[in-house]
Image (spheres, rainbow, N blue to C red):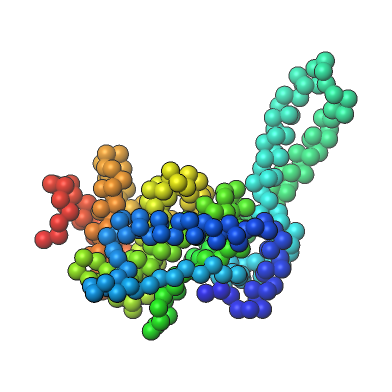
Amino acid sequence: MTADRDLNRRITEIIKPLVPADAEEKVQRAYRQFNQIIREHIRNETGLRLTDGDGRSVGLPIKIVDGFPAGFAKLIDRYQDPVLWRLIVGQPKLARLMDGLKFVMSEWSAIEAWAGLPEPARGARPHLDRTWEAGAALQKAAIVEDIRKQLREINEDILGAYIYPPGRTPWIELYWMPIAMTAGMLEVEIADLALVTMAHELAHGYTHQGHDIDGQIWDTSAFRAADLRIKEGLAQFYAQTIADKVAIRAPGMRKAFDEMLKLQSGPYTVHTQWLKDDPATQSKRQPSQRGEIVRFTMIAARSTKGLTYDAWIAMLDTTQNRFKGNGSPLFE
Ligand SMILES: [Zn+2]
């Protein structure tokens, strides 16, 4: 859910000028083009359906909304400084400036001695040095680094949300402004980051209320209470898997996922550690086998009351060992 109205209005004033005018339209278009495709891949990967045993649809609408989720909004509100946010969003451009300067400066002695040297470039070295100094200082501005760090530490979805109030049909919200702003920070396409967010939130919805082959779902109160590392780990695992699956139609989605991961921590990165202890899993197993191991563990976890994160990891290992023997994932 987005932050309250006054807070949202304050934040929007700061951030809206920093994102492209067509940002919302880009998120809308990505949604229209990929909504069904992503859902189909999630169904295939999880084996879960958003219909009950009688074929009734559970429904999981996606709304593209103005505004910021609470954690992100509070962070921006703490620093109500448009120039600061302009600098944060513009960091990749600053990095390119420094890259170009590095090239010119490292070649400078040859360039300066070049017979074709254009007049305005003559004697430019001190100015290049000065620009380097200014750029490096802006890059290293302690507050910019500090805010990136605080952003990484927000332990809630900052670009979208899966919302499931008691007694109501759940829905997904995609926050087009945070998506556009973060895409700028990461130098990825807005549409690609929107797809990553969509896959992540849909994965929450499917893992929670998708019906397995026996018609079971993840009990809502148990899902609500479940360790964030299990819920977010699963959403991240499936978002990454889907990014690879749609690579031909959306070649930038995996890059957007990987870049976003650099801005995340804690429960949003645990999936990178899953099934890591066994070198065979990493090197020899096909991604589809990894997917099967996670899928079987997830289905079992959904019916395990009070599952701790340690118990989840132990279940992953158990499932993996069953695969090792005969390639069969069966739970007896
Ligand atoms: Zn999430």
Q: Who is closer to the viewer here, 102 or 179? A: 179
107 left or right of 242 in image:
right
Q: Residue at x 65, y 66 (%)?
A: 76
Residue 180 lies in quadrant: bottom right
Residue 6 location (% of width, % of height): 66, 78
240 left or right of 123 in image:
left
Q: Who is closer to the viewer here, 66 or 121? A: 66
Outermost residue toward the right in this view = 119
Quick check: can you spot residue 308?
A: no
Residue 314 location (% of width, % of height): 25, 59
7 left or right of 104 in image:
left
Q: Residue at x 17, y 54 (%)?
A: 329
Quick check: can you spot residue 11?
A: yes
Q: Quadrant of the C terminus?
A: bottom left
Q: Residue at x 44, y 70 (%)?
A: 61
Q: Exactly how many numbered labels are in the figure? A: 0
Residue 266 location (% of width, % of height): 45, 60
Outermost residue toward the top in this view = 115
Residue 268 lies in quadrant: bottom left
Outermost residue toward the left in this view = 332
Q: Is residue 201 above or below residue 41?
A: below
Q: Residue at x 82, y 18 (%)?
A: 116
